Amino acid sequence: MANSSSITEFLLLGFSSLGELQLVLFVVFLCLYLIILSGNVIIISVIHLDHSLHTPMYFFLGILSISEIFYTIVILPKMLINLFSVLRTLSFVSCATQMFFFLGFAVTNCLLLGVMGYDRYAAICQPLHYAVLMSWRVCGQLVATCIISGFLISLVGTTLVFSLPFCGSNKVNHYFCDISPIIRLASADSYINELVIFIFGVLVLVVPLIFICISYGFIVHTILKIPSAEGKQKAFSTCASHLIVVIVHYGCASFVYLRPSAKYTSGKDRLVTVTYTIITPLLNPMVYSLRNKDVQLAIRKLIGKSGFSLKSL
């Protein structure tokens, strides 16, 4: 593409350097994608159908599962197509749209995990005031705030990236339109744009993580005061699933986004990105279904109502 003309489309290199291994990746990623969709749909269905799960904790989990489904829909179908396609191009507008929705759902997930940490704090540390602190009205307002804030931050980030001129190479060394690989193709100095994006990254990743850590500090302090070992175990079990998802999600996202684009290394960053675009959405339903006794019991009840027994599966 000539240097004098603006880029009208981007070429996603993705995993093209792996040659025939792309077929293996296609099968693996397709299986994982189907597990992600089915797992999150099961979580949503169980929470909706079982009245014992109509609590703030599971309400937030259901919203997180819905967000995770759309989060993967934005990225994975196009990635799967590109593993088989020679033409891996994406128009300028389509690339910007993909980035907007990806960042929107990603930021929403980060904020939701922070809210879920506050919910656990309120339930364990303020049990007498829990009904007031986490009323359904408050829960709805918190979810709406997470979604609106997520997409407003995404709009700012996407605008900062695509307001830059792109007149050189259109080859994106990634499998989707992410911030670092796209901004590296800009034909102008992107320091200010990157600085603003970094500040937003700190607000989205570091601030909620600190909030979660403080919440769990109070939670641990409260749990240690519980006299019975059974009570301690029950309290810890309600937090363990959330903590596992938080560590993986925030850890991988911080590694990629809390660095300047100049330090972007395609191979290592692609591997880490696979973790939070595929493994984290996969981890969410698996952790909450395998480790959470309430969800397990609700699934058994639904299977029982359908006329099946667990032994027949």
Image: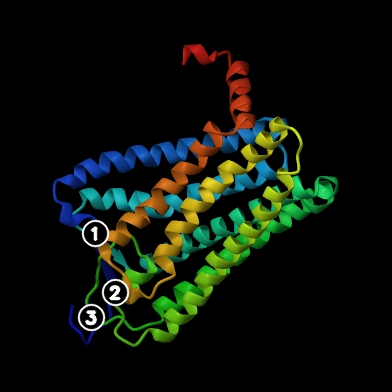
Q: Quadrant of residue 224?
A: top right
Picture coordinates of residue 211 (x, y %)? 64, 62
Q: Is residue 39 visible?
A: yes
Tell me which amino acid carries mark 2: Thr
Q: Residues within 10 Å of mark 1 (few under 14, many from 20)?
A: some
Residue 15 placement, left or right of 143: left
Quarter of the image containing the N terminus? bottom left
At mark 3, the secondary structure is: loop
Q: Residues within 10 Å of mark 3 (few under 14, many from 20)?
A: some
Residue located beneath label 2 in the image: 8
User: Which of pointers 3 and 1 lies earlier in the amino acid sequence?
Assistant: 1
Tell me which amino acid carries mark 1: Arg
Picture coordinates of residue 97 (x, y %)? 43, 65
Distance, label 2 to label 1, CA atoms, is 14 Å
Residue located beneath label 3 in the image: 168
Tell me which amino acid carries mark 3: Gly
Identify whether 149 is placed above or below 189: above
